[in-house]
Image (cartoon, rainbow, N blue to C red):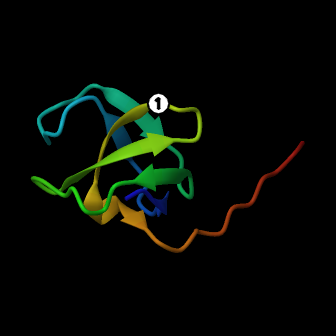
């Protein structure tokens, strides 16, 4: 089951493998929306899909059910 979650920690990565040792991945912005399979937590990682359709794994502790405040500045 896919749940909507939001990135809650700066420095969260969408990694290719379910491992803390995997250094490859895409950095996600704070508050970014993810589709997460919360029922499939293994090694502290959950499968996730970002809004562009990229899939991978994120730390379960770095996602939240509530969205963070986002402020955009246009100069």
| Most distant residue in the top direction | 24
| Most distant residue in the front direction | 1
Quadrant where the N terminus sits is bottom left
Name the residue located 58 percent from the left edge and 33 percent from the top edge: 52
Image coordinates of residue 28 in percent, x first then y, are 48, 43
Task: Tell me the quarter of the picture where residue 49 sits.
Answer: top left
Task: Tell me the quarter of the picture where residue 17 sits.
Answer: top left
Name the residue located 78 percent from the left edge and 53 percent from the top edge: 72
Image coordinates of residue 65 in percent, x first then y, are 47, 72
The answer to whether residue 2 is left or right of residue 56 is: right
Bin the neighbour count of mark 1 within 10 Å (Cα to Cα): few under 14, some 14-19, many 20 and up: few
Image coordinates of residue 57 in percent, x first then y, are 29, 42
Task: Tell me the quarter of the picture where residue 67 sits.
Answer: bottom right
Label 1: element kind: loop
Quadrant where the C terminus sits is top right
Name the residue located 16 percent from the left edge and 57 percent from the top edge: 44
Labels in figure, total: 1
Q: Which residue is mark 1?
A: 54
Q: Nearer the viewer, residue 6 or 28?
A: 6
Image coordinates of residue 73 in percent, x first then y, are 82, 51
| Most distant residue in the bottom direction | 66
Name the residue located 49 percent from the left edge and 51 percent from the top edge: 34
9 is higher (above) or lower (below) than 53: below
């Amino acid at each position: 089951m896919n749940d909507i979650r939001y990135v809650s920690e700066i420095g969260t990565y969408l990694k290719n493998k379910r491992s803390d040792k995997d250094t490859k991945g895409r950095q996600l912005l704070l508050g970014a929306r993810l589709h997460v399979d919360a029922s499939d937590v293994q090694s502290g990682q959950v499968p996730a899909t970002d809004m562009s359709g990229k899939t991978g794994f994120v730390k379960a502790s770095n996602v939240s059910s509530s969205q963070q405040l986002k402020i955009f500045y246009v100069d």
